[in-house]
Image (spheres, rainbow, N blue to C red):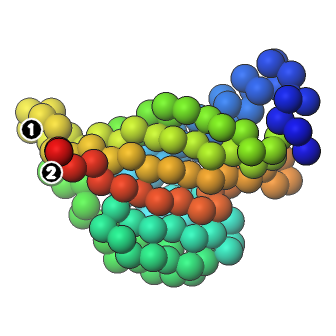
Amino acid sequence: MNTTLIDEQTREAEIEAIKQVVASVEHSQQNELPDEFVGLFRSDAIWTTGHGKRLFGRDEISAFTHRVLPGAMKDSTATYEVEHVLFIRSDVAAVKVRQRYTTLSDQSVESVGSPLYVMSKEDGRWRLVACQNTEVLDS
């Protein structure tokens, strides 16, 4: 399907729906809600963590998330901002996100990430399908 067939109003509505998924990622991370986070993924999704751990399928993503997320936000928080959406098809999008981890005490930036989320729209809902969470290192 050619993405030029998406009219501007539809495109904006889809981008808003995608932003809501990214907002749910932020909410689930900030509030340490592994089930909410895992529910955003398609069952056969793949995810590579910021440190290179490769996870295949929602079950592996769930096991990892339930192990690392509880307690992860005790001293910091994370914010997520959609920087760019590239529609590969009208129901598939590559979404570039800016991720910032800040301390709770003084809001100083601890680290910055540059995730890429490939998302697909299925049954009227955008889902995470293939995600790479990359830490940004100072050069």
Task: For mark 1, give the secondary structure.
Answer: loop
Say which residue appears at 63% left-offset and 69% top-offset: 45
Q: Amino acid at mark 1?
A: Ser
> Image check: 125 left or right of 118?
right
Say which residue appears at 33% left-offset and 47% top-offset: 113
Say which residue appears at 25% left-offset and 61% top-offset: 72
> Image check: 120 left or right of 77?
right
Farthest residue in the front direction? 139
Q: CA distance from mark 2 to mark 1?
A: 7 Å
Is residue 60 shown to the viewer in this render? yes
Residue that numbered label 1 is attached to: 105
Bin the neighbour count of mark 1 within 10 Å (Cα to Cα): few under 14, some 14-19, many 20 and up: few
Q: Are marks 2 and 1 in contact (CB under 8 Å)?
A: yes
Say which residue appears at 68% left-offset and 65% top-offset: 42
Residue 93, by quadrant, is top right
Check the picture and name the quadrant holding the C terminus. Answer: top left
Bin the neighbour count of mark 2 within 10 Å (Cα to Cα): few under 14, some 14-19, many 20 and up: few
Q: Position of residue 31 (x, y in %)?
A: 37, 50
Residue that numbered label 2 is attached to: 75
Q: Position of residue 57 (x, y in %)?
A: 60, 77
Residue 99, by quadrant, is top left
Residue 109, above or below 57: above
